[in-house]
Image (spheres, grey):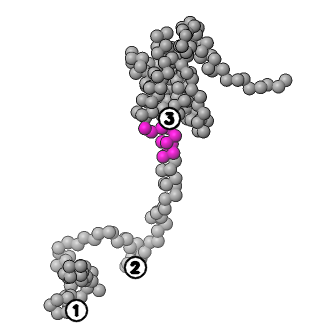
Amino acid sequence: MECSAMPDRSKEFTEFLTFWRLGKPTEGESASPTLPSATSADDTEDRRYFELGLDKDALFHDLYNGNRRTSDESANDQAVMNKLAYWCNHNAALMQEKFLESLHYAQKDEEHIKKCARKDYLDRTTKAAIAGTPVTAKAKDASYKLEQARKDFAPQRPSSAEQPVEVKRTPDGYAPIAPPSALEFISARELWSMDIPPLREIVKGFLPQGLAMIVAPSTRRQKLLPPRHGL
């Protein structure tokens, strides 16, 4: 016996549910909100993120399953849409599809189901959610993976155990030589006791021995900088 895949009847089921709760629609009125077709190239990936959000995001799970936080139904709808905008990666068609499949929508009374049947209401709520949610789950995930890759491929400094240690001979044997620090400080007493040789001049009374720079800008003025390091 061969088994074939069952066709998708979600749209027909939504229309039947709305007809059962509200009765036959009047002329020119749709029995249910227009269910958009989510045909994005990344639709499969967006659906995976949606399922991940329901599993990992406790607030999203509660809102989607009808746990209303306020008595304002429009605010509750917007809260669900905001979460859908994040976890569906701004896929507007998928956002509206999942909104109409939610327990939050199924719990609505007749008045609010009629409100959601207006295409302009769902579109406006969807656009507001996308505008108010600049970062999506997919974008945040990509940013996290990029940061991890940078850390993984960043050049690693050798640990102190891997660095060679210089030693010096002492009366008691050998002792490690501490690496020089970036800045070395001496006290005034040490400076006073140092044997500093007299300054030597290359040009007497004008140019001392050491590193010097003679700068000649376009104005033909020359500046002589004092030596910074002895040669």
Q: Which residue is mark 1?
A: 202
Residue under the point 52% across and 40% down: 138
Q: Earlier in the sequence, mark 1 or mark 3?
A: 3
Amino acid type for the residue under numbered disc 2: Arg
Q: Is residue 56 above or below residue 174?
A: above
Q: Tag 2, which secondary structure?
A: strand
Q: Earlier in the sequence, mark 1 or mark 2?
A: 2
Q: Earlier in the sequence, mark 2 or mark 3?
A: 3
Give the image quarter of residue 128: top left
Residue 110 x/y as whole percent: 49, 9
Region in magenta: 134-144
Location of the C terminus (image quadrant) = bottom left
Q: CA distance from mark 2 to mark 3?
A: 70 Å
Horizontally, is 177 left or right of 186 in the view? right
Within the magenta stretch, is there residue 139?
A: yes
Amino acid type for the residue under numbered disc 3: His
Q: Give the number of the disc on residue 169.
A: 2
Residue under the point 45% across and 33% down: 130
Sort mark 2 into few (<14), some (14-19) or many (20+) by Cα contacts within 10 Å: few
Instruction: Please tell me whether the stretch drawn in magenta is mainly helix, strand or loop.
Output: helix
Q: Tag 1, which secondary structure?
A: strand
Horizontally, is 71 left or right of 87 in the view? left
Residue 120 x/y as whole percent: 46, 22
Give the image quarter of residue 55: top right
Q: Which residue is mark 3?
A: 90
Q: Is residue 174 above or below residue 17?
A: below
Closer to us: 148 or 11 = 11
